[in-house]
Image (cartoon, rainbow, N blue to C red):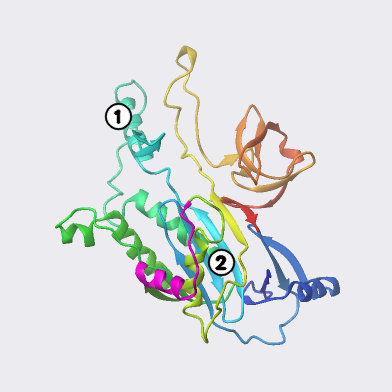
Amino acid sequence: MFYVPVVDLNQKPLMPTHPNRAATWIKSGKATPFWKKGVFCVRLNVEPSDRKMQDVVVGIDPGSKKESFTVKSEAHTYLNVQTDAVTWLSPSRSKGGKRVTKLSPIQQRRMMRRTRRSRKNPCRKPRSNRSIGGIPPSTKARWQWKLRIVNWLGKMYPISTFVVEDIKTWTKKGQRKWNKSFSPLEVGKQWFYQELGKIARVELRQGRETKELRDDLGLKKLSDKMSSSFYAHCVDSWVLANGWVEGDGHLKPDNTDVLCIVPLRFHRRQLHRLEPKKGGIRSPYGGTISLGFKRGSLIRHPKYGIAYIGGTLDGRISLHSLETGKRLCQNGKPEDCSFLCYSSWRAVPNS
């Protein structure tokens, strides 16, 4: 059963409510419906009768390809989310079972910068090295994606605790100093835990503890890691949340519906493409604005319905499908698009 998130007039999250009650509120004018990046919510137009909060826990199961988040209280499972991890920052990829070398975005930028130096064109004065300090940009981008999902959930539910599976890896055998202080995974997750602590309490669980919780309830995990089924990844985030809530929790999942989220890739603005056109013309490339619309924005089109904004070409906009991400058209008119909301991902329900 899907419970509807509720916020007050100041956008502060309250306890979710039953869909029938939410419908009654909307019909009487007591509440206003709206969408929060793929999730149906209501905003109360009056002072709530009670602000008593139950403990709402978010179980988080990080991964290299897929990740899962579960929002749960003692009585109900409110939302299961499975997301694709940010993988396009890696300098190599797999194709047909073989590992293919590929330049990372940072390596591409360095190559373009060095080739510009050999051409006779204006050059600005070099800035100071801004990359000193903090964590590597590619590492931070991967963990910032998880933090954006958490912040989105925090705007809909009164979260009190995060229960996270503490992933570990030893990148260099016998070099503890490297593993604890310089490994991208270790540095990134410590930054993530620190940011989570600013929102609510953080509890860590080891992978073996997650398996024990799953085995105690007799739940099986699918071997197909790319599946969108609840039992592929969300089963782990569910048992993490279920094991922390007050009381005995549930003996089996009470909500196995999954909201699948795919991050949208926005290309950094470049002065020109990697290769010039005929005649040596170098056209600009990248950016996040398409004729006044921010890319990723959800719009309503009279022909294609609800879609999201892509790139632009010759005064027209590309529209993409929310379900598949495929381009619907490349000649959309800006005046035909009604803006709904901005989003940096596409969400697809999977019941």
Q: Is residue 331 visible?
A: yes
Closer mark to the observer between disc 2 and disc 1: 2
Dividing the picture into quadrants, the one containing residue 18 is bottom right
Q: Give the percent coordinates (x, y) of residue 1.
A: 68, 70
Q: Is residue 3 left or right of residue 235?
A: right
Distance Cα–Cα, label 2 vs label 1: 42 Å
User: Counting residues from the N terminus, which is met first, the one under dot 2 or under dot 1?
Assistant: 1
Give the residue number, with chain letter if any, for mark 1. Answer: 114
Tell me the residue that label 2 is attached to: 153
Q: Quadrant of the C terminus?
A: bottom right
Q: Residue furthest top?
A: 279
Classify residue 122 by image quadrant: top left
- Residue at the far right in the pictured view: 28
Q: Residue at x 52, y 63 (%)?
A: 234
Q: Is residue 197 left or right of residue 118?
A: right
Say whether residue 35 is magenta. no
Give the residue drawn at x 49%, y 13%: 278
Q: Position of residue 285 (x, y in %)?
A: 50, 31
Q: Residue 348, relative to residue 336: is it above or below?
A: below
Q: Residue at x 72, y 69 (%)?
A: 42
Q: In this picture, which residue range is highlighted in magenta?
A: 205-225
Q: Secondary structure at mark 2?
A: helix
Amino acid carrying mark 1 in the image? Arg
> Residue pushed farthest front?
218
Q: Nearer the viewer, residue 145 or 124?
A: 145
Q: Is residue 213 magenta?
A: yes
Query: Looking at this view, is 216 or 300 the one in front?
Result: 216
Give percent across and percent down for residue 316.
67, 31
Q: Determine the secondary structure under disc 1.
A: helix
> Type of residue at label 2?
Leu
Q: Are marks 2 and 1 in contact (CB under 8 Å)?
A: no
Q: Residues within 10 Å of mark 1 (few under 14, many from 20)?
A: few
